[in-house]
Amino acid sequence: MTEVRTVGVVGLGAMGAGIAQLCVEAGLETIGREVTAELGETAKGRIAHFLARKVEKGQLDGQERNAAVERLRLTTELSDLAGCDVVIEAIVEELGAKLELFGELDWIVAPDAMLATNTSALSVTEIAAATTRPERVVGMHFFNPAPLMPLVEIVRAELTADEPFERAYALGERLGKTPIRCHDTPGFVVNRVLIPLLNDCIRVLDEARVSPEDLDAALKHGAGWPMGPCTLVDLVGIDVHVHASEALYEKLREPRMAPPPRLVRMLQAGKLGRKTGEGFYRYD
Ligand SMILES: NC(=O)c1ccc[n+]([C@@H]2O[C@H](COP(=O)([O-])OP(=O)(O)OC[C@H]3O[C@@H](n4cnc5c(N)ncnc54)[C@H](O)[C@@H]3O)[C@@H](O)[C@H]2O)c1
């Protein structure tokens, strides 16, 4: 298997910046592509800040931190990714934008390069079909925040070949993650299980007329959850959870996947959880 030396990360938003941070910390030369130089610089500033905090906490040596930050090169030109062994895409969750990007990458990177998408809810197989080499496309589904969440789902699309699939798995390990192998089905593994489960929890709020505090206590102390469902949905963001529920419902047509009306009302009222200061709980 080809050793990965240079990684391209396309899109340096919440997920892409976290993935780029993992890459530079793992000693990989990394090229980050954003749509404007300013967005790239902002992301690099955030990465430098997080790594400085690790130095303060004694988790990283100052020199290592500087070397890691220097390993990230920024560009707005996709053609600068030509020499990458792997490109990980983390742009907006819109099929059209991803198809266009993969179509362009197909002409830019070497024939044996591996292309990965961090999509949460789109079909990796459909994205791969935008290229002339669908066998070299995989899903690498990181969790938010990528530097802290240990799991990465390595997703085999319909036509993915063994070598790029295992290259993605090995890269996940090299980035210090716990990778798992799965196939390209809606929600992959965690979201397929967690989204309907959380939706059930929210419906129980109304059915059993239980308070958010008591529901959280029930799942923590009766089922060993590390945090209650209302706390978790507030943390994830009501908007992100409703969007993921709608995407799964659209594909699977199972009523449990549909967002509960209570969450839709919260979304409409702008109560998005921690990020807006109010969801099931208030955050001051
Ligand atoms: N946020 C999460 O919890 C989460 C978790 C797992 C996976 N994901 C997936 O990761 C992807 C990114 O999500 P996010 O939350 O980081 O979004 P985000 O909006 O924070 O970041 C997306 C970034 O991509 C940039 N961008 C858009 N088009 C681009 C292009 N053609 N080239 C380069 N950059 C481009 C935007 O400027 C933006 O900075 C999505 O597919 C999402 O479904 C998100």
Image (cartoon, rainbow, N blue to C red):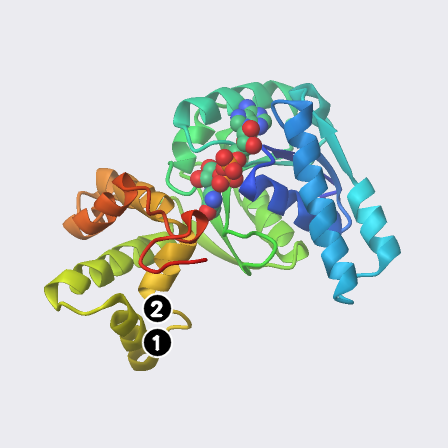
In terms of secondary structure, where does tag 1 sit?
helix
Q: Pointer 2: what residue?
A: 228
- Position in image of residue 122 (x %, y %): 38, 36
Relative to 42, does residue 223 appear above or below in the rendering? below
Picture quadrant of residue 163: top right
- Left or right of 31: which side holds 253? left
Label 1, residues with CA under 10 Å away: few <14, some 14-19, many ≥20: some
Secondary structure found at label 2? loop
Q: Which residue is mark 1?
A: 220
Report x, y in % for residue 193. Answer: 31, 58
Residue 18: x %, y % from top left: 61, 47
**Mark 1 CB lies closer than 8 A to ligand 1:** no
Whichever of callouts 2 and 1 sits on the residue coming sooner in the sequence is: 1
Q: With 51 as the anchor, is 100 left or right in this view? A: left
Circles 2, 1 touching at the beta carbon (< 8 Å): yes
Residue closest to the eye, 17 or 182: 17
Measure the alpha-carbon separation of dots 2 and 1. 6 Å
Q: Position of residue 156 (x, y in %)?
A: 45, 45
Give the quadrant of the C terminus: bottom left
Q: Is residue 13 found left or right of 191 in the rendered image? A: right
Q: Residue visible at 22% across and 59% down?
A: 202
Q: Pick out the residue farthest to the left.
A: 207
The amino acid pointed to by label 2 is Gly
| Left or right, 92 with reference to 244 | right
Residue for point 55% across, 43% down: 15
